[in-house]
Image (cartoon, rainbow, N blue to C red):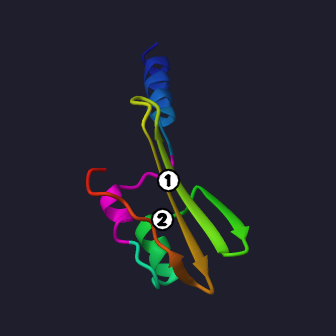
Amino acid sequence: MMSKLIAIILSLFLMACAGSNFKWDTARQIKQGMAETELFNLMGKPSATRSSADGVIYVWTSVNGLTGSVKTVSVIVKDGKVVSAPVIPDNF
C-alpha cells in the first residue's frame, strides 16, 4: 500500500511540471549575436524547434500543472548566432 502511495505522489509530481524548466532571469541573459552553443548552455534543450525563412526558431516552454502557469520564450538563430533575442520585462 505504501509503495502505491509513493508511486502516485511521484507521478503527480512529475506531471506537475512539463517542458523546459527555465527562469526569467536566465532568459534575460540571451543576447543578439550570442553563439548557438552558448544559448543551449544557458537555456538547456528547447521544447520545440522549427525552421523559418528567418532562421531556426527555438522555443522553451515551462508548464506548472499545480499552479497553471505557463512560460514561453522563443529565439531565432541563423548561421549559428542569435538574431532575435527575447525582450522580457523586469516584472516577470
Look at 56% across and 59% down and name the residue there.
Answer: 59
Q: Mark 2 falls on what kind of element?
A: loop
- Residue 4: x percent and y percent? 49, 18
Foreground residue, 55 or 58?
A: 55
Count of numbered badges drawn on the protein: 2
Q: Mark on residue 20?
A: 1
Magenta-colored span: 19-29
Foreground residue, 46 or 11?
A: 46
Q: Is residue 28 magenta?
A: yes
Q: CA distance from mark 2 to mark 1?
A: 7 Å
Look at 26% across and 57% down and name the residue there.
Answer: 90
Look at 51% across and 33% down and name the residue there.
Answer: 15
Q: Mark on residue 44?
A: 2
Q: Is residue 45 above or below residue 37?
A: above
Q: Badge 1: few (under 14), some or many (20 or more) residues near its Cα, within 10 Å?
A: some
- Residue 57: x percent and y percent? 62, 67
Left-right relation of 9 to 55: left
User: Amino acid under label 2?
Assistant: Gly
Mark closer to the chain start, 2 or 1: 1
Q: Is residue 14 above or below residue 30?
A: above
Look at 49% across and 25% down and name the residue there.
Answer: 7
Q: Residue furthest top?
A: 1
Q: Badge 2: few (under 14), some or many (20 or more) residues near its Cα, within 10 Å?
A: some
Quadrant in the picture for residue 13: top left
Q: Mark 1 falls on what kind of element?
A: loop
- Residue 39: x percent and y percent? 47, 74
Left-right relation of 54 to 20: right
User: Amino acid under label 1?
Assistant: Ser
Q: Mark on residue 65?
A: none
Q: Is residue 84 magenta?
A: no
Q: Mark 1 and mark 2 in contact (Cβ < 8 Å)?
A: yes
Foreground residue, 43 or 72?
A: 72
